[in-house]
Amino acid sequence: MISTLLVANRGEIACRIFRTCAQLGIRTVAVHSDADANALHARVADTAVRLPGATPADTYLRADLVVKAAVSAGADAVHPGYGFLSENADFARAVLDAGLVWIGPPPEAIEAMASKTRAKELMGIAPLGEVTESDLPVLVKAAAGGGGRGMRVVRRLDELPAALEGARAEAAGAFGDGEVFVEPYIERGRHVEVQILADTHGTVWPLGTRDCSLQRRHQKVIEEAPAPGLPEDLVKELHALAERAARAVAYVGAGTVEFLVADGTAHFLEMNTRLQVEHPVTEAVFGLDLVAEQIRVAEGHALPLDPPRAHGHAIEARLYAEDPAHDWAPQTGTLHRLAVPDGVRLDTGYTDGDEIGVHYDAMLAKAVAHAPTRAEALRRLAHALERATLHGPTTNRDLLVRSLRHEEFATARMDTGFYDRHLTALTAPAADPHAPLAAALADAHGRSRFGGWRNLPSQPQTKRYLMAGEEHEAHYRHTREGLTAEGVRVVHADARLVVLDIDGVHRKFAVARYGDRIHVNNLTLTALPRFPDAGAQPAPGSLLAPMPGTVVRIAEGLAEGASVEAGQPLLWLEAMKMQHVISAPASGTLDALHVTEGQQVEPGSLLAVVKAPL
């Protein structure tokens, strides 16, 4: 029996595994980088071991340090979570060689499926060799790892070299393996997968299907179980293929076999030899704790011959600290408040007051709703996310709510190109004309109204806010009756709640302020100074950092005075394990270059200036 378990991971998945361990009476050990010294997963574990450094390559990808941590902390088992070393056969062997229990499949099974190229060969599928015009579009894909890292869609042959180079660099940084391959890119396919669970006694459970078609940058955003609208014969075929893949490598534990489904045909993608991020929807539908089942299998227990029956429908949405309207730019800062209404499951690696840094994935939490039908689960999740309290950096919350309520998704007609088609509409700025007034009234609450009563009416007070990219003014007065404003009746106003009577309807505005940033319901406003500084505006042609990150590359030969073309890549920023290209906004001359390779930058930092010809 396992008594103490180390989780070789961080954040949400570590916290989720620790929760099951507590229920099973298993002591827990966390590992943490210096950047994660105060992270939630390090705080909730019974014991925590430091991995010196901040980058994944120096910490969570160091198998030797993780195994040493497990031994020194007295752990007798290791769970890899997902990402990092979870699909690394050498790490699994190192854990076993140290005399520890490995909560995962045999190293040989990981090795057989860890490389997507070898997995396809095992399933009788060959990757593309030399790419020609007739093969386009194609997908450049990392052979190791997952989560959308090291993936590029190529639609023109002249884009292929840069895509290969970028994918290799991203894959090497995220997984320690820069191998990539090329395969056909299927337009408008559905991403469907099968959860499997296998024991050491020859039993393999295919646990239904999941649909993970809503993706950004090939990383899943919304997942559900079961995959809606699939014919029964196709479901049986998917189950059979998944079981075949598992038995081909003598699989043990939890794993996932992924497919693209197009025109009623299933195309094998890969087998993930680990727990998936989206496993909670399967847990909800089958009434299982997959982590508990992983532990029992590792302890040698046999699964029943037949899996439990599925009930209802579950949908999961991944909440990211990112700005979907600006190239999904990751966001950092203090997460002041994170809470969702009762009735949905929230898996998170953060709590109120935690800092969101630049080193790791931008996912804050996963919200999961389960209901008897898909329509009910969808409504429940959208309602909960809309009313969630999210105070801190910009998130994709509005995108999630709009996606769940989009007619194409609601009728289960989505595919992997959903965001390519609908992103502009889904990220249109949200605004409320009364939100600035609510912010102003909350701020004015408790301020001195008068030095003394007088008969003349007071002059209106004015405050300025930035909301949805536009400047708004709010006007109000202090009177004998209290705070007033034109066109509405102020029913109640304090620092946290404002109630306005608008055309006979009472509307509530929850207000929270953190410095100049004000959250009004689910809108974010920025308080502007009374007298703006005209000199604070950047010069024309200025390139500002859209996110915090590291300058990992500057275009070869780029220097001040060089001629550049519109759209030409100038430098590359890396943040949260993703690379982002900064390109010239127009043709002209590079008037200034303010950064060097390896330099850390903050959002809004001046990177370079491109001067257009006169």
Image (spheres, rainbow, N blue to C red):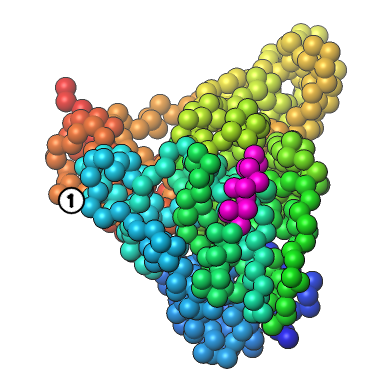
**Any magenta on residue 9?**
no
Query: Image point 56% across, 71% down: which residue?
Result: 247
Left or right of 331? Residue 609 is left
Q: Position of residue 538 (x, y in %)?
A: 35, 32
Most distant residue in the front direction: 233
Tag 1: amino acid: Glu
Residue highlighted by disc 1: 556
Is 50 or 127 nearer to us in this picture? 127
Query: Image point 76% across, 71% down: which residue?
Result: 304
Left or right of 21? Residue 399 is left
Q: Quadrant of residue 388?
A: top right
The residue range painted magenta reads: 228-239
Left or right of 52? Residue 16 is right
Is 271 or 335 nearer to us in this picture? 271
**Any magenta on residue 235?**
yes
Query: Image point 64% across, 86% down: which residue?
Result: 76
Residue 353 in sight in this render: no
Q: Give the vertical position of 17 relative to 549 (above or below).
A: below
Most common SS among magenta residues:
helix
Q: Secondary structure at mark 1?
A: loop
- Crowding at dot 1, Cα within 10 Å, few <14 / some 14-19 / many 20+, comes out as few
Q: Position of residue 481 (x, y in %)?
A: 85, 17
Q: Position of residue 193 (x, y in %)?
A: 57, 53
Query: Which quadrant: the C terminus?
Result: top left
Q: Position of residue 99 (x, y in %)?
A: 57, 91
